[in-house]
Amino acid sequence: MPDETTLEGWTPEIGGGLTLEEVVERAFDYRGNVTVVRTDGAEVEGYLFNRCGDVAAPFVELFDGNGDGPLTIRYAEIRTIRFTGRDTAAGNSYAAWLRAREAAKKTSGAPPAAGA
Amino acid sequence: MSVPLSQMWAVAAYVLRQRLRGRRRYPLVLMLEPLFRCNLACAGCGKIQYPPQILRKHLSVEQCLRAVEECGAPMVSIPGGEPLMYPEIGPLVRELVARKKYVYLCTNAILLGEKLAAGLFEPSKYLSFSVHMDGLRAEHDEAVCREGVFEEAVAGIREALARGFRVTTNTTLFEGTNPLRMREFFDAMMDLGVEGMMISPGYSYSKAPDQEHFLRRQRAHELFSRMLSHPKRRWKFNQSTLFLQFLMGKHDFECTPWGNPTYNMFGWQRPCYLLQEGYASSFAELMATTRWEQYGQRSGNDKCRDCMVHCGYEPTAVHHTFASWRGLRGTVVATLTGRL
């Protein structure tokens, strides 16, 4: 189930069998904000919505925490990516909604709000 | 079928033009997502799970129109998110209608009455409200995870019809659907007076909360066969009869992933409306650099194995209609006789 597996809070260390490309791929699939740590130590937090790994200078694209962008960062400038934001696809399963609905009916007769 | 003749003619002429130009791959419907924000959180939807700053963003009208021009498809579907929450929806629709694009505004209709009363839209043969209805009251409210939405949608439909707008419904079906209840639903929508209905099996979005109720291919064929066998003459479907026959298992079509390209704030989505495998910065780049051979059932791609969704197969059905006399004859016969 999606809400039982989330990368939220993951702070990967590149190396030892884990490549930057793998971390980028996970970040691209992640439905929350991430923090891109540059090789110079600077950090950018935002939503990573695209990556292009099969070009001469691979890059990622993201909108920052204010929604500004897109910002483009080359793989060569990235030390790692931390999964710092809430995973919006997790903890929100259909089964959870059904459970909440039944519980709400039993207590007050009112259905839960959407997305509960 | 309930598609107006003028629309049918416009689409047919467009398809024939593409064929005469020798274009193997061409778009039929642009899926234009101006925003991801929605006032519902349906269990089967994988479109709205984003951080707040993304949900607050939306495309400008200029960005939307640029995408429409770039793509060139004769029809524009505006899903989302909930497009009636898009602050520029009135101006956007006006511009599209002025460009003679056939617009399907896909809405849950919760805000429809309010927006119509505000005079945001004018009736036009180019504009249809495509109202999300996943069945009768119990089934629909269950699907959208909120009680009372069915009644709100019905009220919105009535209001739009009373004001002279074209209204269709779009229905996504999941495992556990009762075909007899769906036949009752078709009756109910026709009683309401909608122009036509669109139906499709759901797609198992990896980010959708409900992963357990998506239809597998064989089950989908069985369900649609039971639901659509001996269709009543009064049922009108706003989609290709060949696509409906495909859902029933009568055709072995392959997906046309470029048929309904998708544009949103991230760019042109690869490869289709359902899969999110990256973005291209232009429509030309999308068409030229996507590895199309990696998609569709015959590609062996697991993500495509059970997909029978209209955005991939309706373009195939339309192409099939014009690719051979047999296809054209099949469509004409089904349209005239009402048999599927």
Image (cartoon, coloured by chain):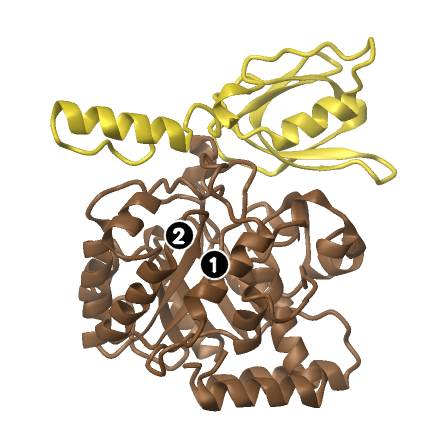
Q: CA distance from mark 1 to mark 2?
A: 8 Å
Residue drawn at x 46%, y 59% as measured from the top left: B61
Question: Count of labels shown?
Answer: 2
Label 1's element?
Answer: helix
Image spot of residue B320 (x, y percent): 67, 78
Chain A color in figure:
yellow
Q: Chain of mark 2?
A: B
Q: Residue at x 48, y 63 (%)?
A: B224
Graded by Cα atoms within 10 Å as few (under 14), some (14 to 19) or many (20 or more), the crowding at tag 1 reads: many
Regarding residue B221, the answer to whether it shows in the image is yes
Please, is residue B182 above or below residue A13 in the view? below
- Say which amino acid is labelled 1: Leu
User: Which residue is located at x 56 percent, y 82 percent?
Assistant: B11
State which quadrant residue A63 falls in: top right
Residue A17, horizontal then vertical, whole percent: 83, 13
Left or right, B214 with respect to B256, comes to left
Query: Which of these two is toward me, B338 or A4?
Result: B338
**The N terminus of chain B lies in quadrant:** bottom left
What colour is chain B? brown
Circles 1 and 2: CB distance less than 8 Å? yes
Q: Is residue B285 above or below residue B147?
A: below
Dot 1 and dot 2 within a common chain: yes
In the picture, the disc for residue B177 is 2
Query: Residue tagged by mark 1?
Result: B223
Q: Is residue B72 visible?
A: no
Up-down relation of residue B126 to residue B31 (above or below):
below
As helix, strand or loop, the secondary structure at mark 2 comes to loop
Point out which mark residue A39 bears.
Answer: none
Chain letter of the residue beneath label 1 in the structure image: B
The three-letter amino acid code for the residue at tag 2 is Thr
Where residue B119 appears, as percent x and y from the top left, is 22, 68
